[in-house]
């Protein structure tokens, strides 16, 4: 894995595709065990979580459904502090076991605004699976049930995460070069 350039920034290799895939399989195994005999609904948060949600779902071997919602709070490399719901969820969640699938949780702002909308629909249970968590950036505490990686408060691209629209298609994760 070599250094890459996305727009005006350079990024260095951080997590290989192999390491990511191994950890995603481990999380899927936990979910398969925790939800044995149930039929959870996975809700992937677009755009960033599409690769993680896809790979995670490929490794789910229990009955399960998946849907997506589009939320946004980033512009460039910083959170705007405002959460925009671009595509809403059109399913009844009452009595369902829900697993929110997120690419990254840093400040916690996006989920702090979104989770009450889910809870208002009275699901049987609500858990969160996240690819990346930045504990140092957390402003709004969110309980994470399944976390692939805790990372430093540095900007990353790849594996679904972008920098101004580019970099999502990279199969590994790269960290901004200091």
Image (cartoon, rainbow, N blue to C red):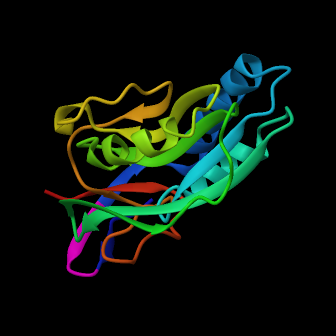
Q: Residue at x 68, y 53 (%)?
A: 91
The image shows residue 27, relative to residue 132, as above or below, that is: above
Residue 59 % position (x, y): 77, 39
Residue 177 appears left or right of 90:
left
Residue 135 % position (x, y): 25, 31
Which image quarter is the C terminus in? bottom left
Q: Nearer the viewer, residue 128 or 94?
A: 94
The image shows residue 20, relative to residue 171, as above or below, that is: above
Residue extending furthest left? 178
Residue 78 appears left or right of 108:
left
Which image quarter is the N terminus in? bottom left
Residue 63 % position (x, y): 86, 36
Q: Residue at x 42, y 40 (%)?
A: 115
Q: Nearer the viewer, residue 70 or 164?
A: 70
Q: Nearer the viewer, residue 149 or 61?
A: 61
Q: Residue at x 51, y 42 (%)?
A: 118
Q: Residue at x 23, y 43 (%)?
A: 107
Q: Residue 33: within the magenta?
A: no
Residue 37 % position (x, y): 86, 20
Q: Quadrant of residue 175?
A: bottom left
- The region drawn magenta spans 7-11
Prevailing secondary structure class for the magenta stretch in the rendered image = strand
Residue extending furthest bottom? 7
């Amino acid at each position: 894995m070599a250094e890459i350039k996305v727009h005006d920034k350079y990024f260095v290799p951080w997590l290989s595709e192999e390491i990511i895939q191994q950890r995603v399989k481990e999380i899927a195994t936990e979910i398969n065990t925790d939800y044995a005999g149930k039929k959870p609904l996975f809700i992937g948060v677009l755009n960033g979580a599409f690769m993680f949600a896809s790979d995670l779902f490929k490794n789910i071997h229990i009955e399960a459904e998946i849907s997506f919602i589009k939320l946004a709070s980033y512009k460039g490399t910083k959170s705007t502090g405002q959460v925009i719901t671009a595509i809403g969820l059109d399913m009844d969640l009452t009595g369902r076991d829900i697993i929110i699938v997120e690419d990254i949780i840093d400040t916690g702002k996006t989920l702090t605004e979104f989770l009450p909308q889910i809870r208002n629909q009275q699901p049987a249970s609500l858990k969160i699976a996240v690819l990346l968590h930045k504990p140092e950036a957390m402003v709004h505490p969110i309980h994470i049930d399944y976390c692939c990686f805790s990372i430093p408060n540095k900007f990353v691209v790849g594996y679904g995460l972008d920098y101004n629209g580019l970099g999502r298609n990279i199969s590994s994760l790269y960290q901004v070069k200091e």
